[in-house]
Image: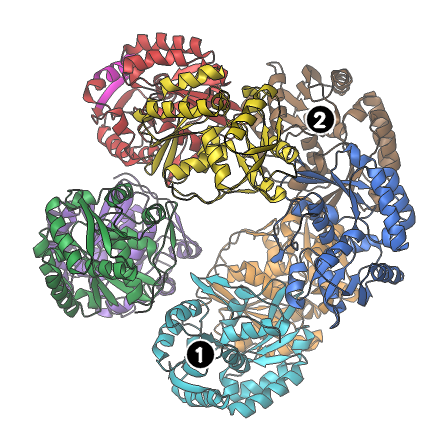
Chain colours: A red, B yellow, C brown, D blue, E green, F purple, G cyan, H orange
């Protein structure tokens, strides 16, 4: 049976073409990932639609659910996000986390305080993003955006997140955060940590880490494109 | 970019936990697969809901779409299926095939005429299935069902499709067909063809074959559990 | 010569289809395993018949013998078991242990005191099993059974022992014990220990550990289905 | 489930320490082998005892049974052997062949007529062996024996069957036969065929070939000690 | 000694960052490649400067020299190119070919007549390119350009040459030509030939083929990113 | 994009046939190396010519430049070298080091004080070499030369640097230095350090170490001809 | 037992440091090679001394003996060689061939008539070598020597036999012969045959071919330094 | 050049068929081994003959020489051995050790005092062997012999040295010594040390260890037949 150790249900936004191949390559043995996808392209509508689709998580016998979209859930602020996550979990009927909650928890886990943030999003999304991070208890040392819309972000190779993460990094930052679930980072996280000598966290890495933690299923490091890709130590929740 | 040679959009029924791992393992280099999932558990409603979700295929820049469910589209007969497929393709905005159309085309491609059919479905679905096959121009030499509902089919290992395919096979059949997209068969198709010495076709194999053909992307054989899993020669459509 | 470092003779009950493939995969280099099998299907008769078959252990130049059946030897209690093991060893003419004695010794070796027990057996066997464990000096924190008869247990994949071991585990237990020599566990013991963070012992693992110990032949860990399968440190007896 | 494509039941004589490791290494995927062992050391008694043990073949859900002893069944002549095999099959309740019947059928399959025979047995067994072969329709071009008793044969490495097969070969022979199920040959059959340029058949190779044929399960060649070990083309029975 | 079977000297334009890694990966054993690089950024001046640098080819004991730039040598027409190549060879003192002469000879070798051409160059270079090809005896079925300047071409991944080659291909063409030595194509040539079912030739592939031919050193196919990259049959010049 | 983590520009003397294959094999993932080559064969002219060629480093978007020639820059003394390196860096427009500066910095990094020096150069170059090393703050414990001219040095296998390094080593030396960028050493550095039990530094190893350091790109050890080739710990500059 | 399929005894001249590593790498499974070595450095004395040492071949139970020196046995002419070989075989007591007889037989086997000969020997040995070849029934199309004495030949890498074989080859030759058992050729024979498109035979290759033939032990091709090294089809003698 | 790090010359007795394959498999990279062989079968004569053959060690440019025979040099006592070794070294002209001196030095290195000795030799050789060991400063806790002559010892597989080493071991021994250079032990030394938990030293292991030490060439452990074969830490002499 696929997913005999655990099934992950993932709610994806309409355009995301990155998470499925990335999870397929990094799933622990006996764990499977399954997708539900919204059809709305407007970020506010998309979040609401996901609540209607959420019950299928239970139908497919997922053990946990991940709301795998950043922008649609940080856009309306931290308080809105927290209430939304509760509504989503109620609808899905299984324990749920979001890309945003996973990324916040992983930053805390790695003891990062002042963050250099990079995101492929258009400029107007940077302010709500910075506010979400600040409201979650961190300082934003620097923030840069690439000014792109979702379907174009999907086309970028990981050398772009590498380059912009190095650009975003500043002396005062004690960690780097790369935000967006359709932005490839797995091939370069290991390189970045080696070169910048500080924790580097990305949305999809945080989602994987969160899923392993929710399922109590540890996962060892993976070789990806010459880059050793590892999860920080997973403790039992 | 994931899917730089081609992106496959797949419409999956609420329960299917088999197609995603199977496609993840067998995709040609440069091809990616992405899922949209219905929420309805009733087969008739499920088909209708899929038409509402179909436009997201275009949003995620899929090059082709697959309607990856058998029962919901053979249930109402061959004519209904053909009209439904046209409606789906119009909504998706990209070339589309269904699990049923793929399986029929692969049977023709392999020159099978009299078919031994095996399916995990409950008994009452066998008659419409047999009728769909007959109306598509084949003879049904034998048909057997396992009497299971979808979520339980997902839990069966491939040794079950192996055993029932051998049980279904009869002397007069010149091919075996295993129907259901949530029934694992890839690990045993090679063994079955070696042992039964006739073509053995399954729903997910037919969907993969169809996808390669629609994208003009040939794919070589794959080793799976000691079993050489190959696609019959793919000609350009 | 097969078995130039040591030959293991194994007395198997009529139905067991699991031990031979499992030992074949895990034997240390230079060690071989050879089977003698009872024909009786009644557990009481089976134990007696094994005494008649035991002398062939010496004929095939086995260095040690294992009585590889749990139920037939715990059924009549700890005292009966101990006397039976002495009778068996006398008949076999070489040092002998049983599945039950091996499992008890391994639990002591790993310092487990309060045990969560899982077994595929029918309910009526759980009481004598619990009593055997208690009479051997442990507490039973929890015990669950699957209610199956031998030939059906042979057909279960290791995902079943995985699932029921997690179900059986309770907060107060400091170890998990999976009982039955025809119940597959080797593919999941490593996962279970990682996830539950306590020792997990199974009948066949205990038999292998016992055999290595009796022959003074240490064996390193083995990769099995993505799961690192290791023996706890083997000290010289 | 071990043996999901087929389970082989094997009746072994008391001393045999060779067949289990050899089958373990050469079984096709999904096929398992399970042993029942006689306790008698006298060849005539051994054959009779095997009839009493045979019913356990059915209990362990074997699909076929092999009587894996040459001497005890050729000793009393071809006619006795044929009647014995019928009795054994009736007792076992599943299709059965013997080491002798397998070896005869493989010789026919490979079109051998005049045979050079080598066997580790004591001299007095060579005459009944030659007679059995002649009565089965072949000519014996040459026959040599090593004069050993069973438990010592088990200790010989395959370089001995290699050396004696070359010694036994004579110009007039169109094939070589190596007889005894406790005599290792698999590591050298490929070398011998390359060097002697004629078919070389051994007891255990014939048993494996027979099992594949009875189960309709073809098996590809295996690399063993630098020697390509292959089965002659297996046709469906 | 590096290059004991042959040393290739390559004259590269100032910006080229693609040829060195590509040759490093595809050189036959015992063959080495060494670079001389022009400093001029103007294409006309670059060609003239290369004549001054050419004598170092002999100093470094290169066995052959390659003028590895397309635009600077097709810009002034076929007749100019041929005279330039003679001047270059005289200065280098070893047998010499250019990217253009290699590409023309490979097209002839593969029997292509009507060509679909794709190039990353700016539009104004397409006309001289088409004229060079026509003056060399071919028909241009279609030609498309990406409108890029050299340093930006170096940054493109091979998925771009893949996409534009498919776009450039037209029904009437019997082959596809991808022109520019700083445009990556090796990872996709095998895919393109499988999918388009006609010869696909690129500048760097032609240079490698030419070098193997000039040195009489055949080279087998290479696996590159899942794509089998092969040279058309190399005959002795 | 080749060199997405960093591009190394290398200024090579006319004859060097060693650096390109050596860098090709040892570059970290995502780093590329590109060559500019002088044409002068006179060492003094060669240095001056390199200043004219240097600007192309910037044109090809190199991130750093290496002046990869020892003799031409130690010949005129330490002071001249330092001034020359400044002139070169100004012309190249990117951070620059030379073979000599890299080798000096690596000797300091490894804490070597009294050096045994071996070089393939003609005798008359040994004195300026020794003086350059002494003027850089080290003692020369011993110095030996092979008396060869550049194009012949390129033809020597690494067993020569191995043999002469052992010959040059003396009891009072606390490190060995092998000088010349066209002298192969990578296959033997690991062996030499194991056998001599002191640091052994070579020109090309120092250049690689310097490049990793300038780009802040750590590189793990490499297996080369049975010899583990490693860089001493690279700290961030 | 080492050499259970066959033991090769080899008589080596005092200096030869090449044959032992080359045979060690290319021996078929189950075949071993063992050395006896002369102490004389004079070629005439060396041949005579070998007759005194020959009986040890039988003592070490070699199945065949090879006189693995060319010059000492062609020096005194074809007739002397043939008589010497008979004397040697009589003394050794097992079937014997020499480097010269093996090389002549392999040339005949490959149907070469006009030979380009290369040898590392001093000039004065070329005439007797050419005469030996002519007296054996071939034409010598060209012959070149390197003018070296034995201990220096042992130090040459295979790139030297490669280079001189290409130099020796002339249009009229239909094969190339490389003579000397201390001259490395195995790494380049495959390259040379591919490039020159005619048979290329060397002393040690001929000795290996001869040994396989004498023992009736076929051997497949071997990968050596990127070069496929194969023996021409070995037929049974 | 074979042996560019060091060449080992080995003086072998007439029958030895074990050392050559064993050294071939375990030589460090860049080290080669070359054989000189005595022809005498009498042990006393053999030692004397070896002095006449010794000068060829220097002719073949060996860096060290090993007298690789135990019995012929312990037979006449420790004092005779020491004088003989000096005579041998003088004749060979390079540093020399014997199988006996290597074995004694390795026992000291591993700090063994009371030794259990096993040897395949005939009984009458055990007394001089024990005396040699005692005279070298050890106690002999136990000594057993197999009673075999040289050519038969060569035919024994390593399972024999395994079995007899376990048999020879006694409680009071703090190490085991296996004596004879034609007795295979490398496949079992690792197993024996793991099982007996004390140092186990054999003649050929000691010779290898001695050679590494004399050449200052460390060698890592080797996997051999499932058994990790390692040399005890080699310190510089």
- Would you name the residue on which mark 2 appears? C152
Residue C149 or D183: which is nearer the viewer?
A: C149
Residue C183 or E167: which is nearer the viewer?
A: E167
In the rendered structure, does residue A65 fall within the stretch colored magenta?
Answer: no
C104, above or below G116, in the image: above
Mark 2–mark 1 contact, CB under 8 Å?
no
H181, above or below B225, in the image: below
Q: CA distance from mark 2 to mark 1?
A: 70 Å
- Would you name the residue on which mark 1 appears? G177
> What span is in magenta?
A127-143
**In this orientation, does residue C199 appear?**
no
**Residue G90 occupies quadrant:** bottom right
> How many marks do you count on the picture?
2
In the rendered structure, does residue A133 fall within the stretch colored magenta?
Answer: yes
Give the structural element (helix, strand or loop) at label 2: helix
Quarter of the image with the C terminus of chain E is bottom left
The image shows residue G208 at horizontal and vertical percentages of 55, 72
Q: Are both tags, 2 and 1, on one chain? A: no
The image shows residue D114 at horizontal and vertical percentages of 77, 66
The image shows residue B220 at horizontal and vertical percentages of 45, 45
């Amino acid at each position: 049976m696929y997913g005999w150790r655990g099934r992950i249900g993932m709610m994806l936004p309409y355009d995301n073409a990155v998470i499925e191949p990335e999870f397929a390559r990094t799933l622990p043995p006996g764990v499977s990932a399954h997708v539900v996808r919204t059809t709305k392209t407007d970020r506010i509508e998309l979040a609401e639609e996901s609540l209607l689709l959420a019950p299928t998580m239970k139908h497919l016998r997922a053990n946990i659910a991940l709301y795998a979209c950043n922008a649609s859930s940080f856009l309306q602020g931290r308080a809105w996000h927290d209430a939304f996550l509760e509504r989503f979990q109620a609808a899905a009927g299984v324990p749920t986390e979001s890309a945003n909650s996973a990324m916040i928890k992983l930053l805390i886990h790695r003891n990062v305080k002042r963050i250099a943030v990079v995101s492929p999003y258009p400029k107007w999304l940077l302010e709500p993003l910075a506010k979400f991070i600040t409201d979650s208890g961190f300082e934003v040392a620097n923030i840069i955006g690439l000014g792109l819309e979702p379907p174009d972000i999907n086309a970028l190779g990981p050398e772009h997140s590498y380059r912009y993460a190095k650009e975003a990094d500043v002396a005062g930052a004690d960690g780097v955060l790369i935000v967006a679930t359709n932005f490839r980072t797995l091939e370069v996280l290991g390189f970045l940590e080696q070169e910048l000598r500080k924790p580097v966290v990305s949305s999809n890495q945080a989602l994987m880490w969160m899923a392993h933690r929710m399922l109590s299923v540890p996962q060892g490091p993976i070789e990806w494109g010459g880059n050793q890709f590892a999860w920080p130590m997973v403790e039992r929740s």
